[in-house]
């Protein structure tokens, strides 16, 4: 009798994973779909491509070849050109000239080299500059001397830069969605997060601009600005929680009121205008990178790890679920219902504030127009991630998946040139489908 | 004696047999709820349907009402096979089901509820006068006066039930199924309900009556069908049955003593309640419970028993009064404080107050005990599982695993999970509010044994109950309440009678 029951245990463990995180498969499916749809010829750039080009020049033209390097005037191209030059210097061939500019610049450079009586054995170029027509103007050069990186086939969607971009754009929504998930699990809602994003950006920008010397502000002031932005929004969240617990007002109404008040306050404080030109040192939070990952992504990962542990491994997390499942039974079991609700709304506000700081940092401005409709994006991520609006059930990591599902669909539609109007229709349908699945699942159980 | 599927003369007994269910089979994931049930209901009889929780009664009723579709089997109404795929189908073939949870819109009046969805109209406008007149006729037919225009939410439970009955009658039903109709009624209301049922019977309507209260069965039923574990056990006329036999066929084994009361040495007063007052619900209530004592608290519905327990537990705010525990005055304003002081309350309504139904039984068990199961703020899941496993075994909680959701358990098992969570607290005072309501006989017995054990361990037990045999069988003393006040305390339980208690309870 033991064997079948243990078999049932494993199948139910798998079943539980499916019902908790089944959205993972939806996300993977979308990744596969958009990968297939965006397969295209890719032209390599960067150091590896440069080494490849230099190597082929030596193979084909020998160590004493004379080379000119033709690239455009962009940061990537400059890096590419420098990498080729330094590699060629190691291998032997001499660089006659390096062009970072237009076809006209290239023409002048070639003329100058030929005037000096030097030979041009090879032209190191990239995909863009190889299409220029000036090479055939010179008998001594010609298209056949072009050496470019080997093109390869790869989905645009799966390019590292694209994936990092998706993650970076999702990070702010995902961070705010942590608090929203907790609120929704307690069977509440927080509509004020979008406005709090704006309020935090304005509040922190004002602190940094007015207390410091604007662009010259130091680290201490950055921290103060961040603390003021997050703190203000945390207080706003606390106010939401107090209204919900002390006066038993519906969370929908309370946070709708806060949505209007916070937005109005942001406009008042900023006098309706953007507060631009925040110092570069402030840029680090939202725009910087660490070990190849954008800092907002690091922040998101850190917060999700913490939130997951809190929700699954602490009494507080257990209480959040219990309150959403049956507040009265929780109260009669000694759960500090009001305290937990207060904390949850405060966290939601504070995380929205943090999202606002990241956004302000990334765009180096505070603006009362930031965060518009974020509450809906965030609620959508939570719902797509499998958290029920009825409360009592949901998973923090599900929300992360939900946020990425929405981000991947948006990004994929951009890459496949879907009309922006149609994109809205698709996103709406996705949200409905997610709720439908949740409802069907509920009815089954 | 089971009729074969191809009965040679199906029309012959159609005159008397209103309903015949044959070989009804229903499986849910992991549960074989109904195993080939046969059931027959004649015109003008009351058939009692008995069985422990989980025996399949509710599932059978839901099949009849179109809420579930059977995997196999047929349903015949007056000799003709019918397909019941929805509640509307059930209505059409003349089956009216009155569930424990009423299907009334609280904001609408009785007559609006009765005709909800079937409003008589003229050119799209509801004929309100017609509705009201027809509703009044129905109530006259039932013989009950009801504030017909008041919103149903303001009616008493008994009145709402009458509205449900009227609603069924308005659709010309021939079969009425009542699922535990007496559960929330006072004794006099139950009497009135029985009068209504007898009247329906005389009109040729067949009534299926489900109840856990065996006394009622003897009073109202003509025949009794017993189910156990999804199977039909027996169907017999009431005059051939005894209380003992009904219990034994329900649980499937012999039961020696329904109330296994042990008497222990009773010690010092543990819980002392003085002048507890809250509005009109609880007025100047004073009593004490001693170590090792079981104090039975009874009275009519609305006498203030539950409200008193909630005040002691801090679930509601009190206007006046004091509570002492072991000679120490307590100032309890939240359930949290009561729990910390060593008082716990097993609520009457497990589903809405005792359990978080969407959480696992383990998590429910741990809820009041999390301070004990955490270290440095983190949960010790292993300790939690281990502690709960102990109770699963000692209380014989029937669950496939600890992750089972609370809502999937039968009433008895749910009550055991609630018990486990409070036992783990090792409380000094335990307030039971209707501990055996809606629980089958077997589980009841186990809960009685547990109450004995708690008393033996020196705890003070308060047992609120409407079941007088239970109160008489399990208490050391009995406190009777009436309209929020203590009407009297019976010290000599051994020679007390139900009549004596009822006389006090009605005022």
Image: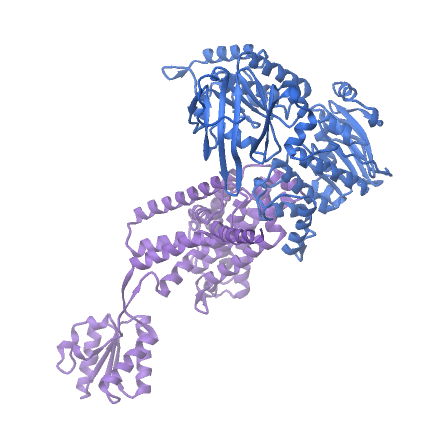
Q: Nearer the viewer, residue B96 or B428?
A: B96
B269 vs B382, left or right, is right
Q: Quadrant of the C terminus of chain B?
A: top right
Give coordinates of residue A87: x percent, y percent.
32, 83
**The color chain B is rendered in:** blue
Q: Nearer the viewer, residue A135 or B119?
A: B119
Q: Quadrant of the N terminus of chain B?
A: top right
Relative vertical location of residue A320 with respect to residue B168 in this rendering, above or below: below
**Residue at horizontal 35 percent and vertical 58 percent from the top:** A32
Relative vertical location of residue B89 with respect to residue A328 in this rendering, above or below: above
Give coordinates of residue A105: x percent, y percent.
22, 75
Relative vertical location of residue B31 with respect to residue B219 in this rendering, above or below: below
B347 vs A251, left or right, is right
* Display coloring: by chain
Q: Nearer the viewer, residue A255 or B193?
A: B193
Give coordinates of residue B91: x percent, y percent.
46, 22
**Residue at horizontal 14 percent and vertical 80 percent from the top:** A138
B315 vs B13, left or right, is right
Q: Quadrant of residue B153?
A: top right
Examine the rendering and report whether any part of residue A407 can be seen: yes
**The color chain A is rendered in:** purple
Q: Quadrant of residue B194?
A: top right
Examine the rendering and report whether any part of residue A359 can be seen: no
Q: Nearer the viewer, residue A203 or A175?
A: A175
Q: Quadrant of residue A365?
A: bottom left
Give coordinates of residue B229: x percent, y percent.
58, 36
């Amino acid at each position: 009798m033991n064997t079948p029951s243990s078999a049932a245990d494993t199948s139910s463990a798998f079943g539980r994973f499916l019902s908790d995180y089944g959205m993972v498969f939806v996300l993977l499916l979308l990744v596969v779909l958009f990968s297939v749809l965006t397969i295209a010829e890719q032209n390599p750039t960067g150091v590896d491509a440069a080494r490849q080009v230099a190597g082929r020049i030596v193979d084909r033209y020998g160590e004493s070849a004379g080379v000119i390097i033709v690239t455009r005037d962009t940061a990537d191209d400059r890096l590419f050109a420098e990498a080729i030059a330094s590699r060629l210097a190691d291998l032997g061939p001499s660089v006659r000239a390096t062009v970072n500019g237009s076809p006209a610049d290239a023409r002048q450079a070639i003329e100058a080299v030929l005037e000096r009586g030097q030979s041009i054995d090879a032209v190191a170029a990239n995909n863009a500059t190889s299409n220029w027509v000036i090479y055939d103007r010179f008998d001594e050069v010609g298209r056949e001397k072009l050496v470019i990186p080997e093109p390869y086939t790869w989905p645009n969607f799966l390019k590292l830069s694209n994936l990092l971009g998706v993650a970076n754009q999702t990070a702010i929504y995902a961070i705010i969605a942590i608090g929203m998930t907790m609120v929704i699990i307690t069977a509440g809602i927080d509509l004020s997060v979008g406005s709090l994003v704006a309020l935090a950006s304005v509040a922190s920008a004002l602190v940094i601009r007015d207390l410091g010397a604007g662009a010259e502000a130091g680290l201490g002031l950055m921290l103060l600005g961040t603390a003021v932005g997050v703190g203000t929004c945390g207080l706003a969240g606390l106010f939401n929680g107090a209204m919900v617990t002390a006066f038993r007002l519906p969370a929908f109404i309370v946070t709708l009121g806060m949505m209007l008040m916070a937005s109005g306050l942001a406009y008042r404080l900023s006098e309706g205008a953007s507060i631009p030109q925040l110092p570069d040192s402030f840029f680090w939070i939202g725009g910087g990178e660490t070990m190849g990952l954008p800092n907002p992504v690091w922040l998101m990962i850190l917060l999700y790890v913490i939130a997951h542990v809190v929700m699954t491994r602490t009494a507080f997390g257990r209480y959040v679920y219990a309150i959403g499942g049956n507040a009265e039974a929780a109260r009669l079991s000694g759960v500090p219902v009001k305290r937990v609700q207060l904390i949850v709304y405060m966290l939601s506000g504070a995380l929205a504030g943090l999202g606002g700081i990241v956004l302000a940092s990334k765009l180096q401005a505070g603006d009362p127009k930031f965060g518009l409709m974020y509450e809906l994006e965030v609620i959508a991520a939570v719902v797509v991630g499998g958290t029920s609006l009825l409360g009592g059930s949901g998973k923090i990591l599900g929300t992360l998946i939900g946020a990425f599902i929405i981000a991947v669909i948006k990004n994929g539609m951009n890459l496949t040139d879907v009309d922006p109007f149609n994109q809205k229709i698709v996103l709406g349908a996705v949200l409905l489908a997610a709720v439908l699945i949740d409802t069907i699942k509920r009815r089954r159980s | 004696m089971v009729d074969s599927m191809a009965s040679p003369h199906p029309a012959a007994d159609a005159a008397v047999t209103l309903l015949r269910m044959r070989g009804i089979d229903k499986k849910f994931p992991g549960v074989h709820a109904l195993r080939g049930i046969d059931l027959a209901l004649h015109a003008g009889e009351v058939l009692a349907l008995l069985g422990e929780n989980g025996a399949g009664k509710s599932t059978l009723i839901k099949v009849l009402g179109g809420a579930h579709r059977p995997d196999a089997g047929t349903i015949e109404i007056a000799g003709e096979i019918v397909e019941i795929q929805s509640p509307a189908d059930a209505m059409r073939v003349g089956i009216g089901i009155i569930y424990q949870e009423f299907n009334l819109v609280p904001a609408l009046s009785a007559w609006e509820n009765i005709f909800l969805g079937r409003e008589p109209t003229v050119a799209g406008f509801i004929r309100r006068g017609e509705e009201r007149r027809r509703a009044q006729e129905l109530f006259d037919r039932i013989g009950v006066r009801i504030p017909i225009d008041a919103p149903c939410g303001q009616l008493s439970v008994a009145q709402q039930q009458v509205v449900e009955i009227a609603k069924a009658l308005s659709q010309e039903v021939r079969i009425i199924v009542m699922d535990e109709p007496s559960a929330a009624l006072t004794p006099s209301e139950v009497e009135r309900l029985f009068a209504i049922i007898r009247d329906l019977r005389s009109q040729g309507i067949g009534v299926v009556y489900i109840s856990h209260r065996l006394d009622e069965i003897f009073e109202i039923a003509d025949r009794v069908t017993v189910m156990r574990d999804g199977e039909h056990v027996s169907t017999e006329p009431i005059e051939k049955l005894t209380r003992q036999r009904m219990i034994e066929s329900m649980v499937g084994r012999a039961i020696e003593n329904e109330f296994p009361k042990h008497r222990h040495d009773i010690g010092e007063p543990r819980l002392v309640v003085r002048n507890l007052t809250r509005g009109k619900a609880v007025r100047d209530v004073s009593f004490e419970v001693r170590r090792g004592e079981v104090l039975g608290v009874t009275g009519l519905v609305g006498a203030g028993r539950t409200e008193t327990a909630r005040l002691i537990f801090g679930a509601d705010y009190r206007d006046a009064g004091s509570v002492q525990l072991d000679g120490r005055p307590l100032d309890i304003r939240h359930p949290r404080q009561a729990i910390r002081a060593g008082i716990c309350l097993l609520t009457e309504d497990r589903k809405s107050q005792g359990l978080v139904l969407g959480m696992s039984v383990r998590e429910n068990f741990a809820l009041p005990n999390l301070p004990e199961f955490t270290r440095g703020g983190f949960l010790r899941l292993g300790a939690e599982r281990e502690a709960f496993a102990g109770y699963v075994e000692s209380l014989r909680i029937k669950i496939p695993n600890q992750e089972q959701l609370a809502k999937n358990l039968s009433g008895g098992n749910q009550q055991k999970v609630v018990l486990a969570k409070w036992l783990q607290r090792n409380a000094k005072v335990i307030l039971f509010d209707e501990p055996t309501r809606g629980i089958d006989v077997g589980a009841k017995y186990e809960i009685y044994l547990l109450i004995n054990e708690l008393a033996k361990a020196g705890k003070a037990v308060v047992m609120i109950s409407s079941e007088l045999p239970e109160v008489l069988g399990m208490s050391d003393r009995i406190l009777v309440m009436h309209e929020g006040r203590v009407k009297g305390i019976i010290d000599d339980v051994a020679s007390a009678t139900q009549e004596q208690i009822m006389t006090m309870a009605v005022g």
